[in-house]
Image (cartoon, rainbow, N blue to C red):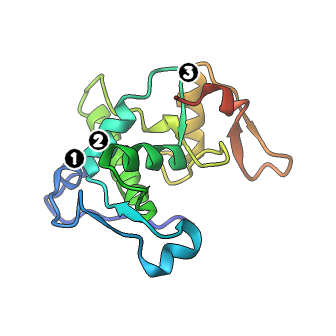
Amino acid sequence: MAKTWKLAEGKTWRSKLEEVHPSHGKIVPVPESMQKTYGQGTMVVPKPRDVDTAIRKIRKGKLTTVRLLRAKLADAAGADHACPFTTGVFLKIIANAAEEARVEGKQRITPYWRVLKDDGSLNGKYPGGVVAQALALSREGHVVEPNKSGTKFRVVDYHARLTK
């Protein structure tokens, strides 16, 4: 079961998105514990707003994966990689901030539903889970199907719709 995040009293998802932290935006050497996966080189710890801006550039009808999003963040920062942990945390914050804005009546919100897992599957950690993401993607013309066991949902032919 997905962990439910609780906000501190008086906090909003938008305020979490706007928080400034001294490590955000820094480029650091790839930590030794991650070198088996990523090799040596540099890693950017992205700023939440940079992740939000990158997602806002994904046009209707197009998609990206978390891996491609991280590659774009790394490239923009001049690093070899983008931190997978902070990027994932910021995706969840961005998704919740977008839904918070929708409830407030805002029309243009960050299209977080266009960010898929690396295998093209939907993200159950987004607000409303995979059902809400599937509905949002379907409204944009994407076809979502379950795998054979019905445990995962994936966008059909997602490779053809990835942003360049």
What residue appears at the point 33 percent right and 50 percent down from the top-left corner? 78
Q: Can residue 127 be seen in this view?
A: no
Instruction: Name the image quarter holding residue 32.
Output: bottom left
Which kind of residue does numbered mark 1 sit on?
A: Arg
What residue appears at the point 38 percent right and 62 percent down from the top-left corner? 43
Q: Residues within 10 Å of mark 2 (few under 14, many from 20)?
A: some
> Which residue occupies the foreground of this view, 106 or 115?
115
Is disc 1 in contact with disc 2, using a CB cutoff of under 8 Å?
Answer: yes
Q: Residue at the far bottom: name it.
A: 33
- Secondary structure of the residue carrying tag 3 is helix
Q: Mark 2 points at which residue?
A: 100
- Secondary structure of the residue carrying tag 1 is helix
What residue appears at the point 35 percent right and 31 percent down from the top-left corner? 56
Which kind of residue does numbered mark 2 sit on?
A: Glu
- Secondary structure of the residue carrying tag 2 is helix
Q: Name the residue under label 3.
A: 139
Q: Residues within 10 Å of mark 3 (few under 14, many from 20)?
A: few
Earlier residue among tags 1 and 2? 1
Residue 14: numbered disc: 1
Earlier residue among tags 2 and 3? 2
Mark 1 or mark 2, whichever is nearer to me: 1
Measure the alpha-carbon separation of dots 3 and 1: 25 Å
